[in-house]
Amino acid sequence: MRFLLDTEHLDLAGSIDAMLARADMPAVVRAWNDGDHAPGRAVWRRLADTGVTALLASEEAGGVGAGAVEMVVAAEQLGRHCVPGPVAETVAVVPVVLSAAGRADLAEPLFAGDLATIAVPDEVPYAADAVAADLVLLLQDSTLHVAEPDVTHASVDRSRHISTVVARESVATDIDTQRALEIGALATAAQLVGLASAMLSTASDHARNRTQFGRPIGSFQAVKHHLADVAIAVEMARPLVHGAALAIDSGAVTTGRDVSAAKVACGRAADLAARTALQTLGAIGYTAEHDLSLYLTKTRALQSAWGTAARHRRTVLSAITA
């Protein structure tokens, strides 16, 4: 089993990274925070043009028919650039369930840049960004419904709101709920490792440029060792994401365990990166004016998205002791 990305994967990551780097994503996120979704939707249309939203949709549904490996490569870059909106839902979960449902008519607008979200009670009782989404779904008792937002709550991440939803119309039955939960958790894990990588870069750049006592603070062991710990955590988490993606693509019996292990490891890496970045930047890192604040709040919000760490640890423990 190979865990190294090939040239096509690296090209996909590079093209998404370059496109988002040109988009001034901090300004896009701040506009989204203030209720102006136009810049963010423009970004999503460009992402759709690259095929990101069609990766996991079947060819019969008009999608690319790629695998989970390609999806996590893309999702990591979306996390790295703090893309607002229902990322895991639009890029991963909704294309999968709509392909399983044979509803190409509902999936096709996603390939043009529409946003979609989904709730899967009891594991995922809230739909992310349902108010901003063009398509809201509810997957309950293996039945897929078109739904609409009911009660909406603010999140610690201002670019993310969560809503309870109510079913409006049943569109398919016998949908594999477990697969939807696994693909959602994996996409979120990939976002978290992207966020962790970005925060590590921010902290490292600051440590190289900020001087105290006539020396860059990055030359002090207390700083270097903390940043090295983050780098190790990120590099240990990323292969778990790729391994879980391979498990999903191959239909391995260990898929649930592998996805949960990836979600836990990526959550820990992102949390460590957030804490270390704050310590490295000092007081400025706490301010809303600094871009780090956008990453801190999104990291906190995604920690519990598509399953808490405790829930995924229980899954790993059950697999080990079975």
Image (cartoon, rainbow, N blue to C red):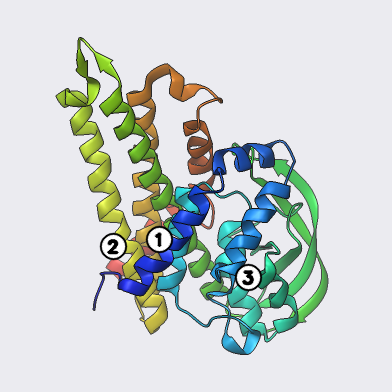
Q: Earlier in the sequence, mark 2 or mark 3?
A: 3
- Give the amino acid at mark 3: Val
| Up-down relation of residue 240 to residue 57 (above or below) | above
- Residue on which the image places disc 2: 239
| Up-down relation of residue 33 to residue 41 (above or below) | above
Element under label 1? helix
The disc at residue 94 is 3
Horizontal side, residue 107 vs residue 294: left or right: right
Cα distance between the residues tagged 2 and 3 = 25 Å
Nearest the camera: 247 or 214?
214
Q: Is residue 174 visible?
A: no
* Numbered disc total: 3
Cα distance between the residues tagged 3 and 1 = 25 Å
Horizontal side, residue 265 vs residue 49: left or right: left
- Residue on which the image places disc 1: 14
| Up-down relation of residue 306 to residue 29 (above or below) | below
Nearest the camera: 9 or 79?
9
Report the residue at 40% width, 35% height from top.
274
Cα distance between the residues tagged 1 and 2 = 18 Å
Image coordinates for residue 54, horizontal then vertical, percent? 58, 74
Report the residue at 69% width, 54% height from top.
41
